[in-house]
Image (cartoon, helix red, strand yellow):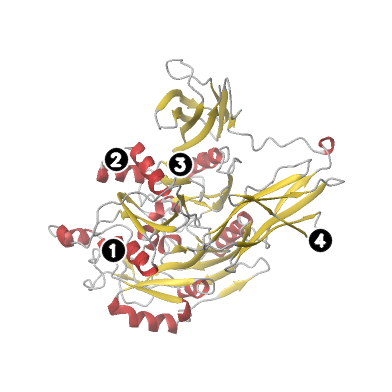
Amino acid sequence: MLHHSLHSSCRLCLVLGFVAFSIALIPPTDAQADPVPPADRVVEWDVDGLEELLPRHETQRERDFWKGREDEMPRRSTAADPPPTGPIRNCAEWEPVTGVLVRYPLGLPYALLRDIDDQVKLHVIVSSSQQTVAENNLSANGVDMDQVEFLIAPSNSIWTRDYGPWFVFDGAGDLTVVDHVYNRPFRPNDNLIPIAFANQQGIPVVGHDMWHTGGNYMTDGANISSSTALVYNEAAQENGMSESDVDQLMDDYYGITSYQVLDYIESGGIHHIDTWAKFLTEEDVLVKEVWTSHHTYDDLEQRSTLLASLPSSTGRNYRVHRVYCHNIGGNSPASYTNSLVVNDHIYVPLFGNATYDNDALAVYEAAAPGYEVSGYVYGGWLTDDALHCRTKGMMDAGMLRVAHIPVLEERSDPVEIEAFAEAHSGGTITTAELVYRRDGGSWTTTPLVAQGGGQFAATIPQPTAVTSTDYYVQFEDDTGRSEGMPRVAPNHWYTFQHAPDPASADVPSRNNEPSTFPNPFHTSTTFAFELAHADAVQLDVFDASGRQVRALFSGEGLAGRNEIRWDGRDDSQRMLPAGVYYFRLRAAGIQYSRPVQLTR
């Protein structure tokens, strides 16, 4: 294995790795339930040359292998379980992790594993017959074996993101694995990995029967998640579920109150959302950018414009960042969005073009300031599969969770900073601090005072002159865990302009206008959004039970800002009672929900 590193002042690291490819001419092995693809297809070998790796899609040989033998497939021992006790919160990728799940034989460069093991454990799925080989090869390639924990279990493929465990915290604050049915039924060993991992780690498991796949799932850790329509299509075909059934299951098992489901971008491929978009924070979304003649160009531009006009879970509109994904051959874009966040590090797939690779790394550094960003060239990365698909973070069951909606807009009063902190270890929070400075001066530290229920607050005093104020919050618990907001604090901080009085403040910018105003409302409210070009739009209103009460608009939305008014009435023009209602927008291939409070 040849690898090479380039370092610059912005701490970007470029690691080159190579993987062998071959024409499939050998029979399948016991460790590989496939069944080799057709002999005329170029396939990927693992980095140690032990095995032809199964592709993303099931092969005909796999299907033929199990045909008529479905009763012999390894399966769960029980039927679907009741959901976890609520309230439930699904963990976001950027929350504290203690390890990363990979599978041996590897579809990843050793340089990546050597860097990950500097931060967290490597949980390596390996069969008992290959454990010794795995130990020898990992050690010989410089992996820190003290940071390796083997999960001895049969597996079929390298796609740990797709079949690995999903994590939630239940109403008691305990970590639980929620196990979906992996949408590759002819890879039954992969489907059992979440249970094997949870049993090894002593984590409770709750299983449901709906098909899903991890590469087609992004969550913000604050009850909003996104997938492509693959989830609806497979649930309808394989589980007989309607779209509302899927939305309800996601709420019941994962606490997802707003499930943003999007139409396909590509006409073919695996239709996973991580091939073209990625949450970086609750407010930041990275979206693929392609050349103007590519068939996805218009759709990507439209979605980027629309997303930037819609509010995130913080109430502020999404900040959309674009990464240019050049043609890697065959009119296929690079998959720079298919990256992995591990605590304060981001690992990015690279494709061997120094100019575009370094541009992609620079986009990550600008979009996620304070993170250490590293890139890895590897011959196995594909246009709709790369680093994210082959790795999965394992959540810290005792994490110190910190949540905070940052102050970013200009203020002209004493600014109260509020934050939430919860020690899932069961311990106590020993340090809670607000740290701030004005105009780049010395940092001032003041205690965040407990308000009850995990809430903390402190005040940044009103200045005597207009200043640029930087701040962050920092917590520590009695296990030694330390977390802040921003999550990489003190390596980065939030900034807002602070004026001594309203007369000295600038007029607020209109580049982040609210999508729903007023909210709450008494007589009428308006839902607003933006489009890059005219497109079909449907806007409906639902009550809290999920029943549609008003078909508000169906027609062509115009390029630019669109505003649609609702008067609080149903389709029969009857005034609706006070309560929470939901706008549901369908436009640009996006389904998006937003609550609004009607008062009487």
Residue type beneath disc 4: Ser
**According to the image, label 3 marks what residue?**
257
From mark 4 to mark 2, how far is it between C-alphas?
Answer: 58 Å
Pick whichever, 37 or 340, lies toward us: 340
Q: Choose the circle earlier in sequence order: 4 or 2.
A: 2
Pick whichever, 565 or 459, lies toward us: 459
For the point 58% across and 33% down, the residue is 515
From mark 3 to mark 4, how far is it between C-alphas?
Answer: 42 Å
Is disc 4 placed on a helix, strand or loop?
A: loop
On residue 41, the disc is: 1
Q: Choose the circle earlier in sequence order: 1 or 4.
A: 1
From mark 1 to mark 3, how far is it between C-alphas?
Answer: 43 Å
Residue type beneath disc 1: Arg
For the point 31% across and 78% down, the residue is 130
Q: Locate residue 288 relative to residue 492 in the image: left or right.
A: left
Q: Choose the circle earlier in sequence order: 2 or 1.
A: 1
Q: Nearer the viewer, mark 1 or mark 4?
A: 4
From mark 1 to mark 4, how far is it between C-alphas?
Answer: 62 Å
Q: Tell me if mark 3 has few (under 14), some (14-19) or many (20+) residues whose alpha carbon lies within 10 angstroms of its own.
A: some
Image quarter of the N terminus: bottom left
Residue type beneath disc 2: Met
**According to the image, label 2 marks what residue?**
241
**According to the image, label 4 marks what residue?**
442
Q: Choose the circle earlier in sequence order: 1 or 3.
A: 1
Q: Locate residue 248 relative to residue 282 in the image: left or right.
A: left
Is disc 3 placed on a helix, strand or loop?
A: loop
Is disc 1 placed on a helix, strand or loop?
A: loop
Q: Horizontal and vertical percent for residue 558? A: 53, 27
